[in-house]
Image (cartoon, helix red, strand yellow):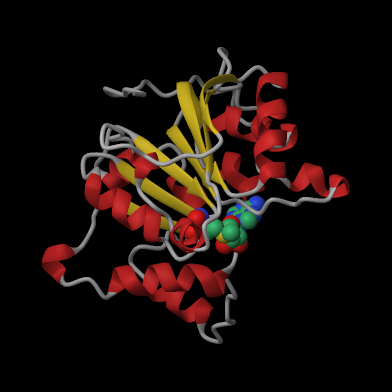
């Protein structure tokens, strides 16, 4: 899917009430901001379809979308800004940034679940460290994830799926579920069952969708080197 450059994307993002302009300033306060005891983060949220549908389906939870490309994220922001006042969503926010910066934005233990939906696969071996399930990124996630948090991954890439199944256990994560050919059944009430924009396209093309769920190693969140702060208390979090 091609993404077109949107000339005024910075202005759209700056004007949107759904976009967090200074994500570091809210560090440790996202639960209050979204009025939710439990926070979900999607890295690479794209045009925000999954995030918006998840925020509607799970209104008591908070939904945060991180996306590094402004021309893409402004589509998500624009669609949210167009909602009629009575349909506005108060449990969702968007951040334009890179996954590498997550510990600057979130306190240890602030995030309860992480979604990686159709992340860039980086199929060449020489780019393996750029994959969002490489060891480099897993240790970043451990700094912000609550004890027991779950990473939910969906991908059409055989290479990303196979390398994730190697990297996660190698870094102490527990694989809770994995499916080569994932089709949510009617009993699957998890947010992972919600289709993403890329997923809808790939299913039309007949591609197989792989999924896995993995639990963060015991000992997360890792200590915060900046202030040695203690993990935030979990308010009624459940990881089903
Ligand atoms: C293939 S798209 C998938 C979009 C959406 N999740 C979906 O399933 O429809 C991957 C998105 O992840 C974003 N992305 C990739 N690496 C990222 C990173 N390190 N930090 C933030 N966003 C990233 C890309 O810009 C792109 O918009």
Looking at the rendering, the quadrant in which ligand 1 lies is bottom right
**Residue 26 picture location, percent across and down:** 43, 47
Q: Say whether residue 45 is visible.
A: no
Which residue sits furthest left? 86
**Residue 118 picture location, percent across and down:** 56, 51
The vertical placement of 92 against 232, above or below, is: below
Q: Say whether residue 73 is visible.
A: yes
Residue at horizontal 65 percent and vertical 38 percent from the top: 161
Residue at horizontal 29 percent and vertical 46 percent from the top: 34
Q: Nearer the viewer, residue 81 or 118?
A: 118
Quadrant in which the C terminus is drawn:
top left
Residue 166 placement: quadrant: top right
Residue at horizontal 61 percent and vertical 21 percent from the top: 223
**Residue 69 picture location, percent across and down:** 59, 67
Q: Is residue 183 left or right of residue 125?
A: left
Q: How many marks?
A: 0
Quadrant in which the N terminus is drawn:
bottom right
Which residue sits furthest front? 206
Residue at horizontal 52 percent and vertical 57 percent from the top: 206
Q: Nearer the viewer, residue 135 or 92?
A: 135
Q: Nearer the viewer, residue 203 or 82?
A: 203
**Residue 217 picture location, percent across and down:** 58, 17
The vertical placement of 55 against 176, above or below, is: below
Q: Is residue 65 left or right of residue 3?
A: left
């Amino acid at each position: 899917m091609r993404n077109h450059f949107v000339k005024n994307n910075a202005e759209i993002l700056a004007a949107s009430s759904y976009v967090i302009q200074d994500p570091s300033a809210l560090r440790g306060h996202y639960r209050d901001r979204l009025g939710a005891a439990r926070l979900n983060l999607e890295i690479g949220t794209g045009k925000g379809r999954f995030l918006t549908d998840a925020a509607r389906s799970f209104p008591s939870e908070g939904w945060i979308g991180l996306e590094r490309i402004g021309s893409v994220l402004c589509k998500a922001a624009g669609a949210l800004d167009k909602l009629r006042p009575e349909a506005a969503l108060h449990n969702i926010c968007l951040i334009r940034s890179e996954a590498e910066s997550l510990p600057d934005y979130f306190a240890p233990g602030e995030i309860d679940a992480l979604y990686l939906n159709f992340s860039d696969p980086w199929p060449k071996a020489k780019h393996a460290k750029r994959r969002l399930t490489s060891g480099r990124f897993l240790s970043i996630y451990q700094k912000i994830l609550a004890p027991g948090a779950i990473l939910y991954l969906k991908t059409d890439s055989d290479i990303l799926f196979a390398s994730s199944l190697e990297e996660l256990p190698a870094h102490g994560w527990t694989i809770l579920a994995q499916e080569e050919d994932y089709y949510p059944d009617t009993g699957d009430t998890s947010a992972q069952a919600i289709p993403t924009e890329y997923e809808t396209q790939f299913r039309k093309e007949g591609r197989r969708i792989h999924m896995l769920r993995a639990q963060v190693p015991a000992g997360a969140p890792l200590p915060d080197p900046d202030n040695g702060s203690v993990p935030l208390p979990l308010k009624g979090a459940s990881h089903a």
